[in-house]
Amino acid sequence: MGAVREAERSVFGWTERAERLSRASVVAATFAIVLVVGVVDYVTRWEFSFSVFYLLGVAVATWYVSKTFGVITSIVSVIVSLGGDLASSPQYDFPLQPYWNAGIVLASYLVVVWLLARLRALHRELEHRVRERTAALTSEIAERQRLEEEILEISEREQRRIGHDLHDGLSQHLTGAALAGQVLADKLTAHLAPEATDARKVVALVEDGITLARNLARGLHPVEMTADGLMQALDDLAATTADLFKISCRFECDSPVLVHDPATSGHLYRIAQEAISNAVRHGKARHVTIRMEPVEAGIELAVSDDGIGLPEPLPVNAGMGMRIMAHRSGIIGAMFEARRNDAGGTTIVCTVIRRGDPGSAA
């Protein structure tokens, strides 16, 4: 099989090189082939037929130049072959025998020319259709990617808007309600009313609602629009995860890492958030580490856990969370990797290519 594939590559490579030659070069090569075959045909005398070898020149002329030139080459080949045979003083039983043979050979050449011309036309039509389909598919893929990015951007924008509404609207409204409730509780206490205890419970519930609303707002719009906002957001994410799931989750960043592009910060945060969610919900991890550091390529964000780890080999059709993280990485031009740890668990790595100073990303 290896030898066959090597032969196929050689043939295809020769064919591609021939396609790049000029028409004049192909015409010259065709006549050179006919001349060489004619000389050999003359030297071997009329007893040996070399008609089949002229087909090489006929095929080159038809395939790489045109059907008309293939017909011309066929006629020239027959003339050269007939001239060589007649020049070698053949002994025929009938005077018209060499001309009859030449007519039969010419007819067979013309059939070959017609078949090759038809095959060449079909080949070119197929190539044209392939180019059209490829262009359409490329355009469709680009349009789909653009729509996915636009939908993701709209989703992020709506999340930020809802986060602002929760923080600046609902939280402020609940804060006002809590203050009003506290005033009412103080008045009831001053009048020694037994309802004062219930009023304070209502205030406590409203304050819990304020905390919940702020946490929701932070989850929907976690990263502040500053270069160091991502570090603070990841640190808060680690603390929130540890408190919510009762596991060990810490953020490590030995040196300041500045990310100036808000979109990059948002995507990196969502990747870390999704990686933690997968580690806790699917990997049953008890220890999660978020690490961000500058590397030679740019900025590396890694989320490691001690869960059950990824299956080996990783399925081609990975889970939705894994595909979302890979897609977010692609949007910001980052390299994405998901690997199984030697000691168990999973590590998700996203490396943002440096476009500015070391330790920062555009």
Image (tube, rainbow, N blue to C red):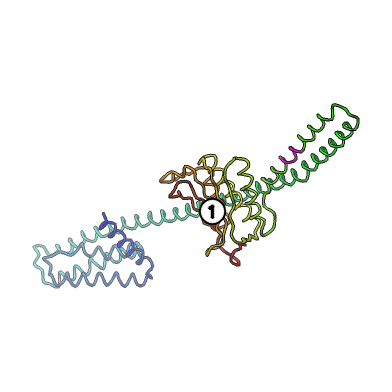
Decide whether residue 210 is among the magenta residues: yes
Count of all numbered marks drawn on residues in the image: 1
Residue 23: quarter of image? bottom left
Q: Quadrant of the N terminus?
A: bottom left
User: The C terminus appears in which quarter of the rendering?
Assistant: bottom right
Helix, strand or loop for disc 1: strand
Residue closer to the observer: 75 or 178: 178
Specify the farthest residue to the top: 194
The residue carrying mark 1 is 302
For the stretch drawn in magenta, what is the main secondary structure? helix
Image location of residue 282, percent across then percent down: 51, 40
The x, y position of residue 167, in whole percent, is 75, 45
Picture quadrant where residue 119 is located: bottom left
Instruction: From the top left corner, tell me how far across and down residue 163 is, in percent.
Output: 71, 45
Left or right side of 135 for 161: right
Q: Count neighbours of disc 1 (C-alpha within 10 A) and say few if under 14, some if 14 to 19, many if 20 or more.
A: many
Residue at position x 56%, y 62% in the image: 294
Camera-nearest residue between 124 and 103: 124
Q: Amino acid at mark 1?
A: Ala
Q: In the image shown, does 354 or 343 lie closer to the viewer?
A: 343
Q: Which residues are magenta?
A: 207-211
As displayed, is residue 360 above or below residue 268?
Answer: below
Q: Say above or below: 54 vs 239.
A: below
In the image, residue 319 lies in the stretch drawn in magenta: no
Compared to residue 97, the image places residue 211 above or below, namely above
Left or right relative to 285: residue 63? left
Which residue is pictured at 70% across the width and 56% down the height? Answer: 225
Q: Is residue 84 left or right of residue 349?
A: left
Residue 275 locus on image (x, y percent) = 55, 47
Q: Nearer the viewer, residue 117 or 183?
A: 183
